[in-house]
Image: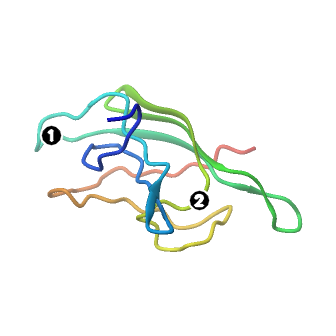
Amino acid sequence: MAKDAYPGIECGGIYPRWVDNHELEGHSPRVNASRPPGEWQSFDVIFRVPRFDASGVKIANAKFVKVVHNGQVIHENIEVSGPTRAARFGDEKSAGPLLLQGDHGPVAYRNVRILPLGK
């Protein structure tokens, strides 16, 4: 398997985009930082939204600046050029809904906080 290939089964993986019936830009986490099933997991995500100029033209891709899972950095400076395969919308915006996905077993969420960090 190629470095940073995305098999699609890891906790914390960044889903690939789906373009012309091909997966693009999926990213596996650097390490498996998961705790055993049934234990609470923690994620801290610093995400920079795509940027647009005054006329609405995209001038910078979205970026996962840092993702920390249970205290371990699993992603850093990962750009994505468009919505991932799991997105509910096909276009990009500078703000939008948050999608928390957990489709490989039972999932519960608590203490979800979204804080804008400024420019």
Q: Quadrant of residue 54?
A: bottom right
Read off the residue under disc 1.
39
From the top left corner, tell me how far across and down residue 82 is, in percent. 59, 59
At x 65% / y 43%, what residue is drawn? Answer: 117
Q: Quadrant of residue 64?
A: top right
Q: Which mark is residue 47?
A: none
Read off the residue under disc 2.
82
Tell me: residue 18, above or below residue 111: below
Instruction: Residue type at mark 2: give it.
Output: Gly
Quadrant including the C terminus = top right
Q: In the image shown, does 46 or 63 lie closer to the viewer?
A: 63
From the top left corner, tell me how far across and down residue 61 is, in percent. 67, 50
Q: In the image shown, does 53 or 8 lie closer to the viewer?
A: 8
Instruction: Residue type at mark 1: give it.
Output: Glu
At x 15% / y 40%, what residue is drawn? Answer: 39
Tell me: residue 32, above or below residue 46: above
- Marks 2 and 1: which is nearer the front? 2
Tell me: residue 90, above or below residue 94: below
